[in-house]
Amino acid sequence: MAYVVGIDNDAEKVISVHSAESWQRRETELAGWLRRTKPRRRAKQTAHLGNTEVDVELLGTLTLLKRMNVQTEFSCAGVSVLDEPEDHSLYAYITLFASEQADRFVRHAMRQMRHRLLVTFEASRSRYDLSSFYIGHNRSFCLLLQRAAERFYQRKGW
């Protein structure tokens, strides 16, 4: 594990940097999201990546990560109320298994997406969770993450 050092417990650690004001905004957005009616906008759209069904909005990113030998475990675009239970529509995320390539991609994505990306690391499972820092910004998160993956791939960062 090259990127996260000194983590010696099982807790998830936030490794992205956000201001106190940003955390307050996020808390306010979460409270509003919980109160709002969540109308169905459209059915969940999926596609196949190998034998796995994935959200269409994350297909490009997941395809590039696979091409760069970055192993993913879970993902959810969270752009539809039909994305599993109601809470999973709250935010989009991708889970990456820690590796040298994943470490480099996470650092790149944090530089590219800055305050829009929330990154946690779970030491016990040796994995990163990359998610939208802002509640309800799931489509833009998916697009920005794909752009970060495309730039990383084009620069041969992997």
Image: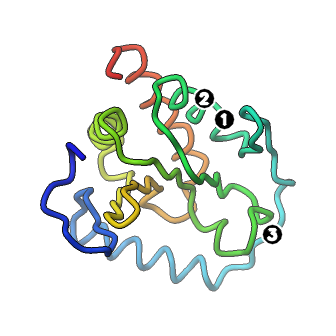
The amino acid type, in three-letter code, at marker 2 is Thr
Q: Residue 39: which disc?
A: 3
Within-10-Å neighbours for mark 3: few <14, some 14–19, many 20+: few
Residue plotted at (47% across, 23% down)? 150
Residue 70 sits above or below residue 127 on the image: above
**Tag 2 residue:** 63
Q: Nearer the viewer, residue 98 or 57?
A: 98
The answer to whether 77 appears left or right of 71 in the picture is right
Q: Earlier in the sequence, mark 1 or mark 3?
A: 3
Residue plotted at (30% across, 40% down)? 103
Whether residues under marks 1 and 2 lie with C-beta atoms below 8 angstroms apart, the answer is yes
Q: How many marks?
A: 3
Q: Residue 18: which disc?
A: none
Which x, y percent locates residue 132? 47, 56
The answer to whether 49 appears left or right of 74 in the picture is right
Which x, y percent locates residue 95? 49, 52
Mark 1 element type? helix
The amino acid type, in three-letter code, at marker 1 is Leu
Residue plotted at (85% across, 54% down)? 42
Mark-to-mark CA distance, 1 and 3 = 24 Å
Whether residues under marks 1 and 3 lie with C-beta atoms below 8 angstroms apart, the answer is no
**Tag 1 residue:** 59
Mark 2 element type? helix
Which x, y percent locates residue 133? 42, 60
To which quarter of the image does residue 35 belong?
A: bottom right
Q: Nearer the viewer, residue 76 or 20?
A: 76
Residue 64 sits above or below residue 104 on the image: above
Which x, y percent locates residue 62? 58, 35
The amino acid type, in three-letter code, at marker 3 is Pro
Residue 37 sits above or below residue 105 on the image: below
